[in-house]
Image (spheres, rainbow, N blue to C red):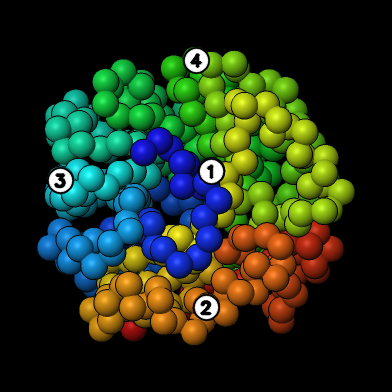
Amino acid sequence: MTFKSLEMRKLGPGNLRAIEIGVTSRCNFRCSYCGAYDLLERKILSVEDVARVIDSLPDLERVKLSGGEVLLEFDICVGIIEYCTAHGISTQINSNGTLLNDEKFNRLEAAGLDVLHFSLNHTDAARHAEFYKVTEKMFPKIVYAVERAVASPTIDAVVETILFNETEKTMADVHRFAADLGVAKHEIQMEIPSLHQGYENTLDHDRICDSIVELVQARRPETTMFFSCLSAYFRPGSAHWARLQPLFQDPGVIYASCIEGKAQLHLHSNGDVMICELGNPDVIGNVFDTDMLAIYENSPRLQAFVRSKHEDQTFSCFRHFDFPGQTEAQKKTGLTALPMPSVRK
């Protein structure tokens, strides 16, 4: 399975084809936009726990492993990847890349990892260190990891850049930097407006469109761009949507549709199941209480979510509507901010 192949297919609800597993919420970075769930986690899913979930899902095609920084639980990741590989299921790891070395790369390759997905929002160590509140020594580690993944004969290397006020004017620079490292797939992730109460680093619609147009014009022909979560901001039929549509006529510019809730659910290390950890973190069940397939097929909240989003003629897990507590700035831009989910006691 290639990167984003599920998001490029027309998938209707009814088959759970992908799960994203939040193996841990722990991390060695301190990102202001972080939406990691259950920061006081007291349980980590074992490989055996995950295997039982996988065995219960007959239509499963892909497993993503994320965090936090997921590679803090490296051995668990390897065990899950090995199990998925043995059962013909595609795997992806989302990482900041700073914990990788040659020995770990060799183990990931031997386990059968398909996609290694890196976060990259800067082109220099000083700016990266300032934003993420880490030392400048971290940035060369990321560069090494990306280059090593690019050189891998079996792992597909992907770089993701978030479009928000920190990167608005430098998206093209980051793209060129990634392309110079040999990256052939560059995901552009719209900033997540929904979890950040009072977090105003998101952009208004005009600025998002301007930045996307400028970025696409700078695209390196050898590097494909994948745009994710656009439907969190733009509805089909809107003027902004119409402005962006011609860009996707280029085969090197891909619109990745949202499959959250429809064909993918999120599983956290404590067993909680969510429609989307970032965009819709309501817990709809727990795999230690209920079979995951039963949650997918029978959850009233999930069924209502899928129905409502189809009625909106779009499919995004983000909630668009005003609610108490939204800031004036967010109301003016049309962005949505939800309170962070409460930490479990």
Q: For the residue labelled by badge 4, is the local secondary structure a helix, a strand or a loop? A: helix
Q: Nearer the viewer, residue 272 or 132?
A: 272
Local packing at callout 1 (Cα closer than 10 Å; few below 14, some 14-19, many 20+) is some
Q: Earlier in the sequence, mark 1 or mark 3?
A: 1
Question: Which numbered dot is residue 303?
Answer: 2
The residue singled out by tag 1 in the image is: 8
Q: Amino acid at mark 4?
A: Asp
Q: For the residue labelled by badge 1, is the local secondary structure a helix, a strand or a loop? A: loop
**C-alpha separation, residue under disc 4 versus residue under disc 2:** 44 Å
Local packing at callout 2 (Cα closer than 10 Å; few below 14, some 14-19, many 20+) is some
The residue drawn where x is 84% and y is 63% is 332
Residue 264 drawn at (x, y percent): 43, 60
**C-alpha separation, residue under disc 2 versus residue under disc 3:** 32 Å
Residue 3 drawn at (x, y percent): 43, 37
Q: Amino acid at mark 1?
A: Met
Q: Amino acid at mark 3?
A: Ala
Does the rendering let one see residue 137? no
Q: Amino acid at mark 2?
A: Gln
